[in-house]
Image (spheres, rainbow, N blue to C red):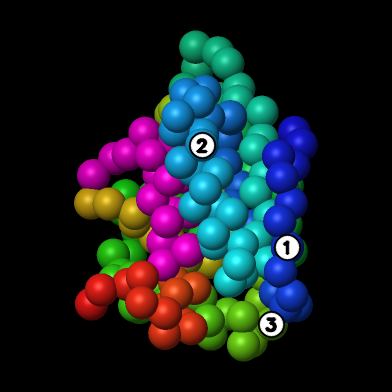
Amino acid sequence: MRALRRVRVSGRVKVRVVVVGKVRDRAMADVIGGYEQRAARYWPLEVIEVREEHGRDDALVKRREGDRLRDKSAGSLVVACDERGDAVTSTEFADWLQRQREDGRDVAFVIGGAYGLDAALRDSASRRLTLAPFTLPHDMARLVLAEQLYRAGTIVRREPYHKA
């Protein structure tokens, strides 16, 4: 378990993206990294990749990965990225994230590995958020979240990226 990159901008609230595993596809990693860098212009962003668990027992794999995600998101308002979560528009997401910043809350978005999120982590999260109405590969979920964090920043600052 190690922090992949810590990118900070001024502000007291930290936004963490805590994910299982590394992005293996170089092209996908570059695209995700580009959006994470853009998002970091608006939010003090910390990306943390926790070690992927290997094994044949899906429940055990999810529990161990869930423990790692929980440890790295401790002290933050935990948002479980899960297809059964709340569906919000980009504008609603931006408004919500800005309210967390105004209230001084650190936020940790957690994305599970190949088997998904541990039920205990998902159920204990402060909020569940869907990134799509269907299951996404975890690398794609990370890309969608990074883009939405960037978009949220442009919405909050009323910059032209977001087209309503």
The residue identified by callout 2 is 30
Under circle 1, the secondary element is loop
Residue 26 lies, with reference to residue 47, above or below; the image says: above
Badge 1 density bin: few <14, some 14–19, many ≥20, Cα 10 Å: some
Looking at the image, which residue is at 70% across and 74% down? Answer: 13
Q: Can residue 138 be found in the magenta stretch?
A: yes
Which residue, as the protein is rendered here, is positioned at the far top?
56
Q: Which residues are magenta?
A: 134-151
Label 3 vs 2, first from the N-terminus: 2
Q: Of 126 and 113, which appears nearest the observer?
A: 113
Q: Nearer the viewer, residue 109 or 59?
A: 109
Residue on which disc 3 sits = 104
Residues at badges 1 and 3 in contact (C-beta under 8 Å)? no
Q: Position of residue 109 (x, y in %)?
A: 55, 56
Q: CA distance from mark 3 to mark 2?
A: 31 Å
Which quarter of the picture shows residue 3?
A: top right
Query: Label 3 is placed on what type of residue?
Result: Gly
* Amino acid residing under circle 1: Arg
Label number found at residue 8: 1
- Residue 59 seen: no
